[in-house]
Image (cartoon, rainbow, N blue to C red):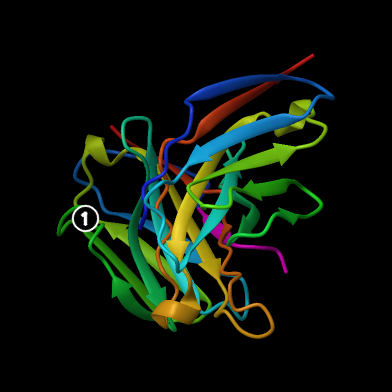
Amino acid sequence: DAGVIQSPRHEVTEMGQEVTLRCKPISGHDYLFWYRQTMMRGLELLIYFNNNVPIDDSGMPEDRFSAKMPNASFSTLKIQPSEPRDSAVYFCASSAQPGLPDTTNEKLFFGSGTQLSVL
Amino acid sequence: DAKTTQPPSMDCAEGRAANLPCNHSTISGNEYVYWYRQIHSQGPQYIIHGLKNNETNEMASLIITEDRKSSTLILPHATLRDTAVYYCIVRPTYINTGTASKLTFGTGTRLQVTL
């Protein structure tokens, strides 16, 4: 498997524009997570899905942010309208449903991230 | 999730063992200790995890104290490629919660490996 794939790798946009970030999780993984990383706040969990259903979106900063997972192999994070303070690296990660024999191993696999700059 | 405390930075000479401490004094019985690292400009990478027994894999060893209130990640022979931010995280497990729990990252330890 190629791992978690994110696109684009870099995005530069102007304030007020709509931004869509894309993620393809590892095939067979049941969980998908969106994180944001900034120097000031570190790595923050925005939202995560289980079997395409949003489980916890308490980290989504405001209504300008939305995330969807229309199927098991694709997710989007949309910002509309974008603002300069949204500038950050956005990471997508996926993990498998823990199962036998090791029900404790829930390691996350991260993508390379999308560097977003809002001017 | 239990909170963890790590030193903000550490240095290590190449070829020597790097010992990264983590304090998690409020850890509860159903929480495991996980370690991830983040090399510059990359996404975090899983290293190792454990409950109460010491663990070893191809990347590192994890030593957890008997009272489980602290742990140490050991990179036995650090190389320049091990320069990264190392995160210690505690989280409850699926078997106890019935669902995967979110991974909450702190500020981690920035390890600098030097020649």
Asked whether residue B76 is in view, the answer is: yes
Coordinates of residue A15 in the picture (x, y in percent): 22, 39
Q: What residue is shown with label 1?
A: A80
Residue drawn at 24 percent across, 48 percent down = A17
Residue drawn at 48 percent across, 58 percent down = A92
Residue closest to the far top: B115
How packed mark 1 is, by other alpha carbons closer than 10 Å (few <14, some 14-19, many 20 or more), is some
Asked whether residue B40 is in view, the answer is: no
Residue A108, located in which quarter of the rendered image? Answer: bottom right
Quick check: A95 above or below B41? below
Coordinates of residue A64 in the picture (x, y in percent): 18, 56
The one nearer the camera, B101 or B31, is B31
Q: Is residue A103 left or right of residue B76?
A: left
Query: What is the total number of numbered labels drawn onto the structure image?
Result: 1
Coordinates of residue A54 in the picture (x, y in percent): 32, 76
Label 1 amino acid? Gln
Residue drawn at 60 percent across, 60 percent down = B52
User: Magenta residues, as a range?
Assistant: A1-7
The one nearer the camera, A92 or B113, is B113
